[in-house]
Amino acid sequence: MISGLTHQAVSERSAGRILAGTVSCLFNRTTLPTAWGTIAAYLAAWGVPDGQIARWQALWELRLDTRYDRQVGGGVMLQVLYSGDTREIELSGTREGLLAFGQLLRGEAGSCDLSENQRPFPYERSLSEIVFQEDPEQAGVSIVTEAQILRIRGRREALDLLADNVDGFTSEADTSDHCHVDSPTYDFIAPESDPLVIAFIK
C-alpha cells in the first residue's frame, strides 16, 4: 500500500472514479460506507492488491446491513434545477433519492419524474423529468437539458463511473456539501455536457 498521498493524488490514481472530496470523507468517516464501487476504487488507488480487495469486499458484505431501493419514488425526493445563463445543472435530492438515482444509472435505459421546485432561485427553472440511455456510440457521458427534460446518455463504462461518483458523494458527504462533475475535470464526461452540480435538498 502506498502512503503519504494527498487526497487529490488518490483521486488522480483512481482515474477519476472518486472525487478528492470523497477521498477525504472516506478517510475521516467513522461509519461503514454503503457504496462498494467507491471503496474498491479507493483501495486500488492506494495500491491494495486485488486479492486483498476481494477480502475487504467479503468483510464489507458481512457487515453491511443497508440496502437501498432501485427505483426513485415512494416519497424519495429528487429535483433538477437549470440556469439558462450558465447552463449549469443542479441535481439534488434526499440521500435516498440520490442513491436511488445512482442505481437507476446502472440500467440500460429509463426515466424518472422529478419533484418541482416552485422557487428555483438562483437557477432559472425546475425540470420535470430525467431520461437516460446506454449508448455504445457515445464515448463520454452526455448530460444536456432539452426544454424540461434532462437527458443523460453514454457508454456503459462511462455511466458506471458517473454512478460511482454519485454513490460515493451521497454515501460519504455531509448534507451541506456539494460536488461538481464536469468536463474536462472528469474525462468520462463528454465535452458538450452542461456543467453538473450534485447536492442535497435543503
Image (cartoon, rainbow, N blue to C red):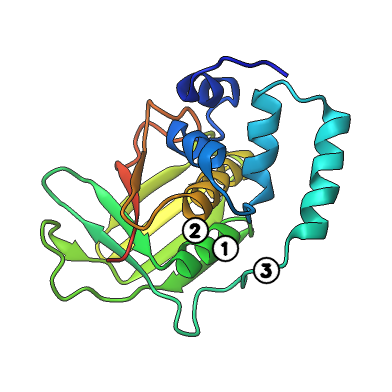
Q: Is residue 191 above or below residue 31?
A: above
Residue drawn at the location 11% of the way across and 46% of the way down: 85
Residue pointed to by mark 3: 67
Give the alpha-carbon distance from disc 2 to disc 1, as whole Å. 9 Å
Image quarter of residue 21: top left
- Amino acid type at mark 2: Phe
The residue labelled by disc 1 is: 104
User: In the image, what residue occupies the spot 61% across and 45% down?
Assistant: 160
Among the 4 quarters of the image, the one containing residue 17: top right
Closer to us: mark 2 or mark 3? 3
Question: Which mark, by number, is residue 96?
Answer: none
**Which kind of residue does numbered mark 3 sit on?**
Arg
For the C terminus, give its image quadrant. bottom left
User: Which of the two labelled residues, at mark 3 and mark 1, occupies the earlier sequence position?
Assistant: 3
**For residue 65, above or below residue 116:** above
Q: Position of residue 69 (x, y in %)?
A: 61, 73
Q: Amino acid at mark 1?
A: Leu
In terms of secondary structure, where does tag 2 sit?
strand
Label 2 with label 1: CB-CB less than 8 Å: yes
Number of other residues with Cα within 10 Å of mark 1, as a class: few under 14, some 14 to 19, many 20 or more: many
Q: For marks 2 and 1, give the one nearer the viewer.
A: 1
Using the image, tell me which numbered label, if any, was put on residue 132: 2
Distance, label 2 to label 3, CA atoms, is 23 Å
The residue shown at (83%, 58%) is 62
Q: Secondary structure at mark 1?
A: helix
Q: Quadrant of the N terminus?
A: top right
**Image side of residue 134 versus residue 36, left or right:** left
Tell me if 159 is positioned left or right of 82 in this view: right
Given residues 104 and 67, the one toward you in this image is 67
